[in-house]
Image (cartoon, grey):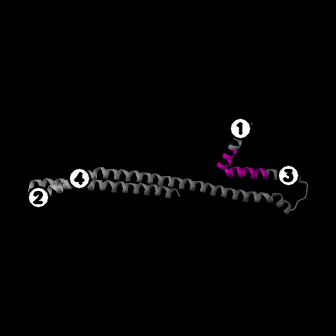
Amino acid sequence: MKSILKNLWNKIKVLIKSYPVVVAAIIIYLYYLITSINLFQTYNVKRTFIDYLLQFDSLIFMWLAVAAFLQSQKIRQGHIEETIRRFEIEKQFEIQKIHTKVVNEMTTLLQDHVNNPLAVISVTTKEIRRKFETDADIIKWLDRIDSSLQRIHNTIRDIQHYETQKMIEESNKALQKGVEKI
C-alpha cells in the first residue's frame, strides 16, 4: 500500500512539474465550479454586487498565486539548467587540464629521449669538426648531420606548439558551446 501511494505521489509530482499550467487551471476551475454551485444553491437569496464579488474574490487571488508559482518554477528550472551548464564547463576545464598535463608530460618525455641523444651527437660532431677542420668532405658530412639535428629539434618544437594550439582551440570551442547554451 505504501509503495502504491509513493508511486502515485511521484507520478503526481511529475505531472505538476511537466504541466504546471494545466494543473493550476484544473484546481482554479474546480474551485470556480464549487463556488458556482454554492451560488446557485442559494439562488433565492437576494445578493448585491459586493456579495457576488465576495463570492468569487479568492478566484483572483488564486490566479495571482498560480502566476507567482509559475514564475518560481521558471526561475528554479533556469537555475537547474545554469547549474548543469556550469558543471559541464567545469568538467570540460578539468578534461582540458588533464589533457594539457598529459601532452606536456609526453612532449617533455619525447624531448628528453630525443634531445639527450641529439646533444651527444651534436657534441660529437663539434669535436670531429675541430679535429678535421681541413678535410672538406668530412666538414660537408658534419654540416649535413647538423642540419638534420636542427630539423629534428624544430620538429619536436613544432609538435609541442601544435599540441598547445590544438588544446587552445578545443577549449575555445568548448567555451563557445557553453556560452551559446547560456
Q: Could you tell me residue 172's position as x and y percent?
A: 43, 57
Q: Distance between the residues labelled 3 and 1?
A: 37 Å
Q: Nearer the viewer, residue 124 or 62?
A: 124
Q: How far apart are marks 2 and 1 (CA)?
A: 94 Å
User: Given contact means CB atoms under 8 Å apart, are the residues at marks 3 and 1 in contact?
Assistant: no
- From the image, tell me which residue sits under label 4: 120
Q: What residue type is labelled 3?
A: Asn
Is residue 147 visible to us here? Answer: no
Q: How far apart are marks 4 and 2 (CA)?
A: 20 Å
Q: Which amino acid does label 2 sit on?
A: Glu
The label shown at residue 38 is 3
Q: Could you tell me residue 20's position as x and y percent?
A: 67, 51
**Residue appearing at x 50%, y 58% in the figure:** 179
Q: What residue type is labelled 4?
A: Val
Picture layout, residue 10 above or below residue 89: above
What segment carries the magenta color? 11-31
| Tag count | 4
Question: Helix, strand or loop at disc 2?
Answer: loop
Q: Is residue 39 left or right of residue 170?
A: right
- From the image, tell me which residue sits under label 2: 133
User: Label 1: few (<14), some or many (≥20) within 10 Å?
Assistant: few
Q: Could you tell me residue 125's position as x and y percent?
A: 18, 54
Question: Helix, strand or loop at disc 3?
Answer: helix
Q: Quadrant of residue 130?
A: bottom left
